[in-house]
Image (cartoon, coloured by chain):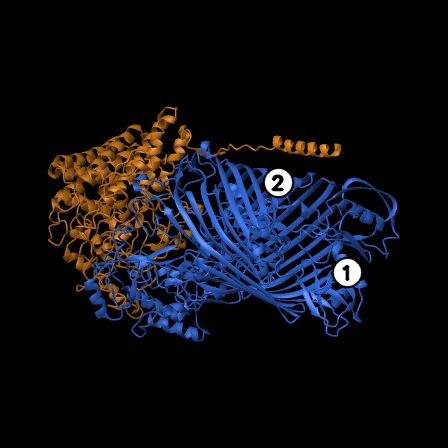
Amino acid sequence: MKKRYFKIISSLLLLFSFFLHGCFDLDKYPEGQLSTVNALSSTSEMEKYLNQFYESGVKIQPYGLATSTGIAYGDQQSDNMVNSAPNTRLAGLIALSDASKLNNYNYIRNLNFMIENINNNKEEGPEKKQCIGEAYYFRAWYYFQMIKGYGDITWVNKVLSIDEVKSPRDSRLVVVDSILHDLDIAILNLKEENSSATMRVHRDVARALKAEVALFEGTWQKYHRAKNDPFFSKDVTDAKIKNYLEQARDAAKAIIDRGVWSISQVGDKPYQDLFIMLDLSNNPEILFWKKYNAADNIGHSVTRYINEGGGQTGISQSLVDDYLTKDGNIYSKEQREKDQKIYGKELSPQIRDPRLSQTVCTPGTQMKPDGTQYQYPPLHVTTYHQNTTGYSMLKFNEYNTSYLPTVTGEGKSQAPAIQYRYAEILLIYAEALAELDGPGNADEIKRALKPLRDRVGMPGVDFDREYNTDPTYPFHNLDKYIQAVRRERRIELACEGHRFDDILRWAAADDLIAAKRPLGALFLNSSLQQENVSGGYYSGALVVGKNIQINEEGYIDPYKLQLPNGFGFKIDRDYLLPIQQRMLSLTEGLWKQNPGW
Amino acid sequence: MNKLLIVKKIPITMRITCLLLCLIVFQLQAEDVYSQKTKISLDMKNTTIEKVLQTIEEKSDYHFLYNNKLVNVDRKVSVRVKDATIADILDRLFESENVEYQVEGNHIILLPKEKVKGLVSGVESVQQQQKTITGKVTDTNGEPIIGATILIKGTTQGTVTDMDGNYTLQNVPEDAILQFSYVGMETQEMPVRGKTVINVAMSEAAELLEEVVVVGYGVQKKVNLTGAVASVRGDELAQRPVVDVTQSLQGVVPGLIVSVPTRGGKPGQSFSLNIRGQGNLSGSDLPYVLVDGVEMNLADINPNDIEDISVLKDAAAASIYGARAAYGVILITTKKGEKGKMRASYQGNTAWSTPVNLPVMANGYEFAKYFNEGCINAGQTPQYSESQLAILEQYVQNPAGINCWPVIEDNYSMTTLYENNSRGVGSTDWFKFHYKEFAFKQNHNLSLSGGDKTSQYYVSGGYYGEEGLLEHADINYRRFNFNANLSSELTDWLKFKINSKYSLSNHRSPFGDGALNEGMFYHGLARFRPTVSPYDLNGNFSELSQVPYLRSGTYAKTNNSNSVIMGGFELTPLKNWNIFIDYTYKKGTTDYMAFATPATFIAIDGTTYIQNTRTELGIPDNGSFTRSMAASQYQSINFYTNYNFSLDEKHNFNLMVGYQEEDNTYKYLYSKVFDIISKTNPGINLATGDKNISETRNGWATRGFFGRLNYDFKGKYLCELNGRYDGSSRFIGKSRWGWFPSVSVGWNIAHEDFMQSMNHILNTFKIRASYGHLGNQSGAALYTFAQTMNISTKGTWYFPNGRDMIIWGPGTFDPNVTWEKVESSNLGVDYGLFNNRLTGSFDVFRRKTKDMLGPSEDVADMFGANPPNTNNAVMQSKGWEFTVNYRGKIGNKIDYSVGGMIFDAQSKVLEYSNPTFTNPSGNWYKGKKVGEIWGYKVSGIIQTQDEANEYNRVINTSYLTGIAFTPGDLKFIDLNDDKKINKGENTLGDMGDMTIIGNATPRYQYSLNGSISYKGLTLSVLFQGVGKRDYNPAGSNYFSGASSYAQTTVFKEHLDYWREDNHDAYYTKPYITGAGSINSFIAKTTGNTTDYYLQDASYLRLKNLTVSYDLPKVVTDKIKLSKASVFFSGENLFTITNMIGFFDPELVFVSSDGGKNYPLNKVYSVGLILNL
């Protein structure tokens, strides 16, 4: 019996000892990680948190083929450039099923999270204020993108819980006013800088965005109301419009008045070189820019696709025609038709505003670091080196790069993504002035635009000399001040992705897009056609009606077959994008679909 | 997993490997004839007879043979003798018992008295002049069976076989029938009919009634099981030439769904397992896999070490594991040592694999023609000129003398300029170019086992090596396994055991982080144009061939090592009371290194240059080197105890209670450096560029109390109660603990008295029912009560000091998240007929997951985040399983078996927070069946312009596309007759013209198996299939062929497209244009989901065919082996399916494009088994 007790007792002891020994802790917490508990409690954390918005809250250069989006290809969605496949929005081919999710609300939620937690950070001082300013700046930026795409949206300024999401769309006026208010807070908090060297948003960047937003909304309301289409706010007043334009003017003027920014004069061709300079930190024209470094795999592909003159895209004849002559006159139809017989002559800086030949390739232009020169547009090529119009893009082409993979490498191009440059500020200022009171501000407008003209050796603005009243000129009905400012804007900012926004806010799609077919260079009886013979550049590869289309007058007509009736842009629908149907049902009808969809 | 203690104490040395609990056999070597000669002394008090017998065995050289059902050896006795004969001792031991003994050689057979009497009386009551029969009883392998009973049918006259299996039976009437029986073997009857020698080969009983099945924390007799448990013997799987048992389990266990993993058939890939269909919406419905009681990955287990596998499918079986086992449990028991002389065993095979199915690309000329047509259809300029077409056609016919690289201009052109364009001449099938005919693999295993009465060991080592099928890439997998276990009795009530496993696997490929992008590689294979030669102007591999990248020296290597040590004690303080205590330590490490370096090319002018331009493959300019180390450490303490007792010899109870703790920690360090100084010796320190470092640390812990009560009344009425109370570190506060009970009952109808008359037909008939609750924590985040904020070491923005770190915004979370609660019920029948030759079972089940962590509900975009997962949904799976097996004999020589199973499971959402039923095709909603495919119905291809005009006039298709329909496009049916083709309001009630056209859930999964053997030659086959399943190929350019310029992929099947001279085509008119506008065109053809292109993914596949041959005993004896066999085996030998030719019905579901993946393998192997 003793042995039995011994067994039982020792068994129990053994059991018990395990019981005492075991006990792993059931309470576990995240280790070495940040969590929502007392989030963003230092300025340094705030700064790193804000870094995420420098990923998505900025404009970038396109990574892929010419069909992708980004600064250099942005104008393909406009009358400035022509891709081999018509842009679906311009062509009116967007289907309701293509509507996208409003993903900008994700960034806005993250910004609201930071704004709600600002007081977790007990440090004070300019660094923290800078962070606060950046948060408001980026919130404004994301909302502005949504306003441009969708019109009325819901203004959300806190971290919503799931029960709070069912809210109607706010009038775009409310949203824009809120954006401008955010920017005022940003301007108040951000640091004042004299260059872009901090690579962070600063006070003048916020002012620039404010000027851009205010001008956008002021002109949007003004011109859509004038057309009485479904896109302006019914409760908008003249005073409200004027107020927006004044805010645009004042914000731009505040930047100008600081006197620290100027137009870049760096390089042989300061205009062309500005867009391929790898370091813009101390360039006086650049307020804010994104740097690329392809060796680090942070690059894009613009040069890869355009450095043979193609990229399945081309500059439109409409843009080429809009450049003034060297002496500041309208480029007349007669002279144009004469010059066009010899390919490239119309682009020559001897004849035209030199910005043209720094934007569009002329024969003899250096294309690659090995010295390859541009001869004729690669109209006959069927690859992505094909050119669609006869005018090849030169802006952004890194012809002199020392980093060779740029030339052919996907993701190896490094031309910077300029967010704001001083020229744009001057153009916003000039346009706001012209919209407010052209005659009264005539001198001020001239003064504002003078540096742009000076850089390329063009005479200053002369509203009468430059006034195009030709009935075929789309803006011939506008007053000479507004017309001149709009042209200057188109020329200076050509192929930088501004044009479509401009067309939208000017309600100008009926004049520029709808039922129109973009054209290219003159082919019939020009030197292009003459090269299409045995021994010539194209040696008969181009067969009119087959792989090259031309219109009755002999101009290249890339969409002749694809869009016989021109762009199908519906002017009562396509100024705004469709809202996903799920949004309508998820908000139980509080959200209504955009007009025409 | 431990079998019950009783099993542990059985020293089995009989040549049959039998699982019989009831038979306890002792064996003892001796030279002598009769027990009278040996004299021994004993002094034992209050000891079981069993102990006494053991002691006699030790002191003499005799072995006892007895059946512990017939002979009570548990009785306590006291013996005190000096120099007594064994016969004397036995007489004293059994004087009051009905036990007699017989001595046969050095065996002493104990039998109940009646039996012996019969035997003896048979001898004595010689009346008639009758004959003497002699013979030998063996098993099917020719091994003698010792102690088999031979009876003259209808009498009690008989005898038993001696240690050579021989018997002599005298006085047998001429018309007698002899009955040969032995436990675990099928009883045989042989008529005498003039013979004097009758030799019998006995085969194992078809279905062993007394078979035991491993269940959670114990074993149970199969006959007493009340839960849904399937079990598989390990050696049935070990011969297959596959990497691990996940593949060989396919088609073997009813209700176990085995599917191809996302990486396809790559070397070393385990298949994915699921029990009884999709269980929740968060994808955390994996079965809980335990190897010898420790949670492990099946990929780390050598299939040769597996003794058996139990699959616990319902709550009754699984709820002892509570919150870890909501979606079933797979229990693996590995082999253990057995008492006796050392046994050595070798098993190995060498095999050759080849892709099951590769697409055949159109040749260069066909491609160009197709491409041109697609461009023209989309209003684009055709890319290939007439002269190019002519050259391509000529090249296809005879490539001799044709320059593949016309229009080459400069060194730049040798690079990517040939991608996505019409330059170049060639006819390359990129699949054929990149895949080998055959790749080699091999597998070798060696095991040693043995032991004495108190200690037994099993030691094994295994090697598995598999080469990849890629011709130009070094992609392979190797695994080493080592396994050792030892158990030892320290005293008669305390046993110690230790079990250790180690596995090391290494995987090498040119793909990985920092190395080549694997997905893009397969993507490129499909989309590169066949019109480009894989060799450049100088005969080197062209850029587009990707070979220079594969051979640049870029690699990614992953080493996984796993070691498990489990040590424990088994205590038996009282009879029938056992205590188990064990501690497990498991350590898993993953050591990863990847070196990426640009490829070297030879330019036109002969100079070499480094290139990294195909950034889609992700190589930095000056190389990068990545190294990461992950370590997980798991510890667990288990102790549990059971006690069984009977009341009145009718009421049998078994009680078990236990406690478990688990703790898991995970650590991960990652570093990646750029600009490598040395290509031959890359290292973290040897880099001049950016250095990125990151780490992760996390952990979880659980604690659980569990218990089980089994009760049966005379083995007829069975009842089992299970319960577990579990706590998890993932939850906080009141959400932390959960209680998971289950109950199950069974009724062995065949055991009822009123069924006795049926006993000759119906041997087994049992009804089972179970109901219970389980929990699931694995879908929940590790820390549900706080939200972490992720970090990126470097963004893409350059600040003055370079790229900076990013803190990302927090996700959303719900602190009240808790367990998913799974309610499971099962009703089953087991049956066995005709001496249990025909057996099987049928089960129906329902599994309801409540408080399910749904994917976040869809909310309006203003919310600005993915809403948190909450316990907001209910899902139900229902299904059934049926198996049937028949074992038969043709004549005396041919054994055969046929069997099959079929099962089905379907899941449906019962509750989900989508109150408006928005977007039913993409979102979950109440009532949605898992796998539902919404699409348009199509009446066919529009054939004429008139038909198209009429369609455009009547039907508004602007929702789909802005482009008018033309001949060659699909004709979408206006289901709701509103003259528009659209999704309506995109709510369940109004989906416009969309409707449910199919379901991607695999239904009616079945398998058929059969085997036939004749004299050691065995043929076995396994077919496996899915009865019904749909695959939606919409939007995949792999399926559609025509797409945007860069994505067009043309296989032979695509050439059957609609054109004026091919109106009956399968494919619509191809459209090829820029990526920006292609969608407007393919919306009319393959871009939308339609019933027209829905693929029937049902299939039947010959999964395995094995021919094996066991060398006859005469041969093996000569070479001193106990067994030698060779086998030939094939995997995935053929497939029957309705899918379009380039799709594999098993692979298509795991890759987004249905084919851009490593293919499955067909394997031919030859193997060898040698046992010492």
Residue A192, image x, y percentages: 31, 30
- The image quadrant of residue B789 is top left
Is residue B1 in sight in this rendering? yes
Please name the color used to draw chain B: blue
Residue B585, which numbered label? Answer: 2
How many neighbours does mark 2 have within 10 angstroms: few (below 14), some (14-19), or many (20 or more)?
A: some
> On residue B442, which mark appears?
none
Q: Residues within 10 Å of mark 1 (few under 14, many from 20)?
A: many
> Which residue corresponds to mark 1?
B119
Please identify, in this view, whether the residue under mark 1 or under mark 2 is nearer the observer. Answer: 1
Q: Earlier in the sequence, mark 1 or mark 2?
A: 1
State the residue in front, B813 or A271. B813
Residue type beneath disc 2? Tyr
Amino acid type indicated by mark 1: Leu
Q: Is residue B623 left or right of residue B1095?
A: right
Q: Observer-nearest residue: B230 or B699?
A: B230
Assign a secondary structure to mark 1. helix
Quarter of the image for residue B703 reads top right
Which chain wears orange? A
The structure residue drawn at horizontal position 66% and vertical position 39%, both measured from the top left corner, is: B577
Relative to B690, residue B1014 above or below = below
Return the chain for callout 1. B
In the shown orientation, is residue B9 left or right of residue B785? right
Camera sees residue A288: no
Could you say whether the residue bearing mark 2 is in a helix, strand or loop? strand
Answer above or below: position of B36 versus B436.
above
The percent coordinates of residue B155 (x first, y second) are 72, 63
Which chain does tag 2 point to? Answer: B
What is the spatial separation of the Cα atoms under label 1 and label 2, in whole angstroms? 56 Å
Measured from the top left, where is residue B894 in percent x and y? 64, 70
User: In the picture provided, is A165 more to the left or to the right than A51?
Assistant: left
